[in-house]
Amino acid sequence: MLDRRTTLAGIATLPFTLKAALAQTAVDAGLRTVPIGSGAIQVPAVGIGTARRYDNPRGEEQFAPLRATIARFAELGGTVIDTAPSYGRAEEVVGQLVSDLGVRDKLFLATKVGVDTREAGLAQIEQSFRKLRTDRIDLIAVHNLRDVDNQLAILRDLKAAGRIRALGITTSFDGQYEPFEAVMRRQALDTIQVDYALDNRNAADRILPLAQEKGIAVMVNLPFGRDRLFTATRDKPLPDWATEIGAASWAQLFLKYVLSHPSRPIAIPGMAQARYVDDNLAAARGPLPDAALRKRMEHYIDGL
């Protein structure tokens, strides 16, 4: 079995024609998809998160790998790119790159609103439209429940007007789970976004089962646990049972664990290099761990 470093090094040295053939094969194979809202929207189960990595690139040297990442992502059939006004210049950077590449119609752009008044919400949302260079944003979510009822009312109006396709809420804090759950119960939502990973499973206690019960799509940030999982498994070979789910790298193993939760999450790891696109999107293909293997994976990571 190969680790992430070895696998990516091998991909990077393939002859161009072979890499092109592999890309076409990947597209033909298709990606596991997840429904959003009523199910009319179907998106691949692995997307791109833009916190930190897209916050403030300067010059072509820093823009080039981000442009190559989004180009490769769209080429392989990826669609979901998640950003937020609070991620530095990420909205602006994504908007510029998507426009330069001419791939807007291939993507599902998601952002957030995170302010404390209706007036500020309206202003921030309009700014997001301008920065993303689009007249329709696929998803806007209320960030960390800020002014949640007022902001959701705005988003419902935007959805009714056809300016957005879906709405939701997010949290990055376990301490918000109780009010988060309350909003999930009293409001009609298309999506939620929480952090969840093989070593960070608190959202699976109540939040993810409730989302499954109510038919709310789940987006998962930090599926690698802020790189804690890579640190814990550094220089370790993949377990033999990784072959049962076709995981050829630690990244694929970690993502397949997230994707296999019964709530059918969409994982949005940060990706700022094209080589990671190939590796991460591969997790959206092939078998996923069943309940027994999920337990085995948890026991393994907890023992490190």
Image (cartoon, rainbow, N blue to C red):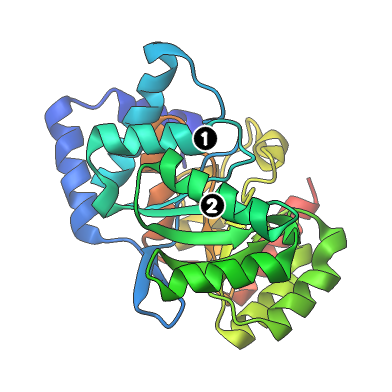
Q: Is residue 256 left or right of residue 104?
A: right
244 in relation to 74, above or below = below
The quadrant where residue 188 appears:
bottom right
| Residue 34, x across and y down, in percent | 42, 71
Q: Amino acid at mark 2?
A: Ile
**Within 10 Å of the Cα at label 2, are there few (<14), some (14-19), or many (20+) other Cα atoms?**
many
Dot in front, 1 or 2 = 2
Q: Is residue 14 visible?
A: yes
Who's the residue at 81% across and 67% down the image? 177
The image shows a total of numbered marks equal to: 2
Q: Residue at point 32% right, 29% down? A: 68
Q: Secondary structure at mark 1?
A: helix
Type of amino acid at the residue the image marks with label 1: Ala
Foreground of the two, 161 or 274: 161
Checking the image for residue 90, the label placed there is: 1
The location of residue 152, given as percent across then percent down, is: 63, 69
Residue at 38%, 64% in the rendered image = 43
Using the image, tell me which numbered label, if any, was put on residue 132: none
- Say which of 264 and 68 sits in front: 68
> What residue lies at 68% left-to-right and 42% top-to-bottom?
229
Q: Residues within 10 Å of mark 1 (few under 14, many from 20)?
A: many
Provide residue 6's location: percent of width, then percent of height. 45, 29
